Image (cartoon, rainbow, N blue to C red):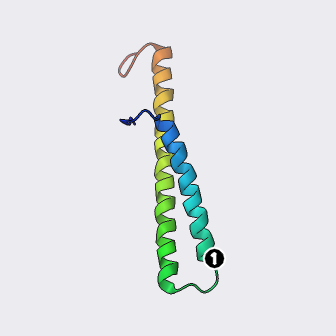
Amino acid sequence: METDSSIPVLEVRKRLFLCLDDVIGFSKKKIGTPKKLESDYQSYLRILVSAVSAYGKLLELNALDLLEQRLTVLEQTTGGGAGTS
């Protein structure tokens, strides 16, 4: 994944993880407070679900990047790409 800015992708993802951690923590705290209005409670639940979903997508992107790095190293050490023996 590439960005147009000078900030490295890993730094952007790190910042996003920190922001999502804050959002998840805040939403959990708001959900846990006694007797909120039902609409407020549902709003915080939607925020929490969206934040957890985004967090999961970032984890998936990180896993794919790691897999791509490992594949590149493997190709370099074996001296070939797909279809070589």
Residue at image position (54%, 43%) is: 14
Query: Viewed as shown, does residue 25 lie left or right of 4?
Result: right
- Name the foreground residue: 36 vs 70: 36
Q: Quadrant of the C terminus?
A: top left
Could you tell me how many numbered marks the image carries?
1
Residue 35, position as x, y percentages in the image: 60, 87
Question: The disc labelled 1 sits on which kind of residue?
Answer: Gly
Q: Residue pushed farthest top?
A: 79
Image point (52%, 79%), residue name: 41
Q: Is residue 15 left or right of residue 81?
A: right
The residue drawn where x is 55% and y is 61% is: 23
Q: Which image quadrant for residue 32?
A: bottom right
The residue where tag 1 is placed is 32
The N terminus lies in quadrant? top left
Identify the element where label 1 is drawn: helix
Q: Give residue 73's position: percent from left, percent from top.
A: 50, 21
* Residue 57 drawn above or below residue 45: above
Q: Which residue is farthest front?
A: 6
Mark 1 crowd level (few <14, some 14–19, many ≥20, 10 Å Cα) = few
x and y percent of residue 44 in the render? Answer: 51, 73
- Classify 53 as above or below 14: below
> At 45% from the left edge and 19% from the top edge, which residue is drawn?
75
